[in-house]
Amino acid sequence: MTTADARPLTGEPIALDLLNTRWTREGEPVDLFAGAFGLSRVEGLAVWLESAGLADRFRADASTLVHLLTAREALARAVADPADEGARALVDAVLEHGRIRATLTAEGPGERAEFDDPTWGPAWTAARNYLELLSSAPERIRKCASETCVLHFHDTSRNGTRRWCSMSACGNRAKASRHYARTRER
């Protein structure tokens, strides 16, 4: 049985959801894969796999965790600076561990991911998802506008102007801060 995912932002595309396994709480860094909430590192991985919808395809073990941490660092660098050649090389290195095989299914043409080593599966899946986000709407991959927040999201708002990971958290704090500043000026 897996523990509930207690991260402040879940449900983002897998690449960004992986980045969001690190966040801040009360000004302190928290890492789901580094013993957050009293979980072991592998238990944190199991929570993430379940939350990301990958638990039925991949196992939570030490090798999978190492590969996923590699992918998380590669993606963090690539998202922070898309022009960074080194970051692109790191993402490509993760992508080297899997491929897409065309298949014919009962519904028609399909695709299936294949891995030489299945412990690379979640890492490859996240890196592949990042490529999909880049090909569809790279400008909608965003970091929360709060200076104290490290979370990322895919802006799916109609007009593409979302600024906060969550209006109920960072957005509300920013509005309250602006309101407080206005009232102090008076």
Image (tube, rainbow, N blue to C red):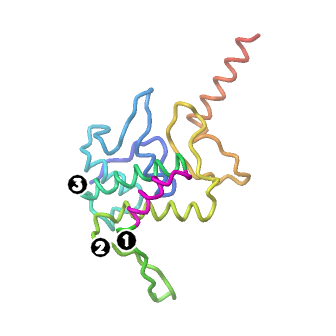
Amino acid type, callout 3:
Ala
Q: Main secondary structure of the magenta part?
A: helix
> How many marks are shown on the rendered structure?
3
- Residue holding disc 3: 62
Q: Along the polypeptide, which appears first: circle 2 or circle 1? A: 1
Quarter in which the N terminus is drawn: bottom left
Does 156 appear above or below 99? above
- Residue holding disc 1: 98
Q: Position of residue 147 (x, y in %)?
A: 56, 31
Residue drawn at 51 percent across, 86 percent down: 109
Foreground label between 3 and 2:
2
Question: Label 3, label 2: how many angstroms apart (C-alpha)?
Answer: 17 Å
- Residue holding disc 2: 116
Crowd class of label 2 (few under 14; some 14 to 19; many from 20; radius 10 Å): few
Does 19 appear above or below 133? above
Amino acid type, callout 1:
Gly
Residue range in magenta is 82-95
Question: Is residue 84 inside the magenta stretch?
Answer: yes
